[in-house]
Image: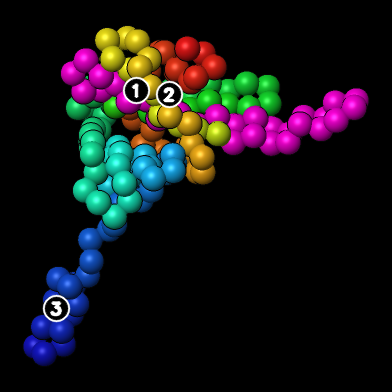
Amino acid sequence: MRIASLALTAFVAWPAQAAETVFECSFGATRAMVTLEGERLTYSYGRPGRRPELELSGDRSSGTLSYHRQMYIRGEDQTLRFASGDHSYVVYARWNAPNQHLTHTEPEHIGGGVLVIRRGEIVRDLRCRSGGDMREWPVFFTLPEDPANLTPDDA
């Protein structure tokens, strides 16, 4: 009986799975993050160590979240769109492979940021000073497709 009690105590005390960071980007004093907990993605924006100024969550059935991936010959774009009323917050990541030219080599490029869109117009383009990479997560394939796939170069 004592062993079963210890096993139950250990099971109850086991910590819940922590949210995983899908995207993190610093703009200086502020940052944007996307975390994944179960099948729920959460976008947050604000100063590290403080309560976020903005936080939006969604999953495949919320109707507020969409994803797009565009592959190119030597690169790709990925976007996650969090919609809230008249606003959308498009988290984007872009990767380009190194490219060898006759006279020089262009290095690999990883960049990302957040586009703030109000009523279809880009009102803010925040580009990462650090971070901005986003690997493809299986949960992305469960989300509705965002046909716009907006990145700053496309807008």
Q: Secondary structure at mark 2?
A: strand
Q: Residues within 10 Å of mark 1 (few under 14, many from 20)?
A: some
**Residue 89 appears in the figure:** yes
* Disc with the residue nearer the chain's start (3 vs 1): 3
Residue 24 located left or right of residue 48: right
- Out of 11 and 13, give the one closest to the viewer: 13
| Residue at 34% across, 30% down | 142
Q: Can you tell which mark lies on residue 116?
A: 1
Q: Amino acid at mark 3?
A: Thr
Q: Can you tell which mark lies on residue 9?
A: 3
Residue 20 located left or right of residue 97: left
Residue under label 2: 125
Residue 18 located left or right of residue 153: left
Task: Examine the image and state in which quarter residue 114 appears.
Answer: top left
Q: Can you tell which mark lies on residue 106?
A: none
Q: Amino acid at mark 1?
A: Val
Indicate whether residue 14 is drawn in magenta: no
- Out of 37 and 47, give the one closest to the viewer: 47
**Residue 134 appears in the figure:** no
- Out of 29 and 11, give the one closest to the viewer: 29
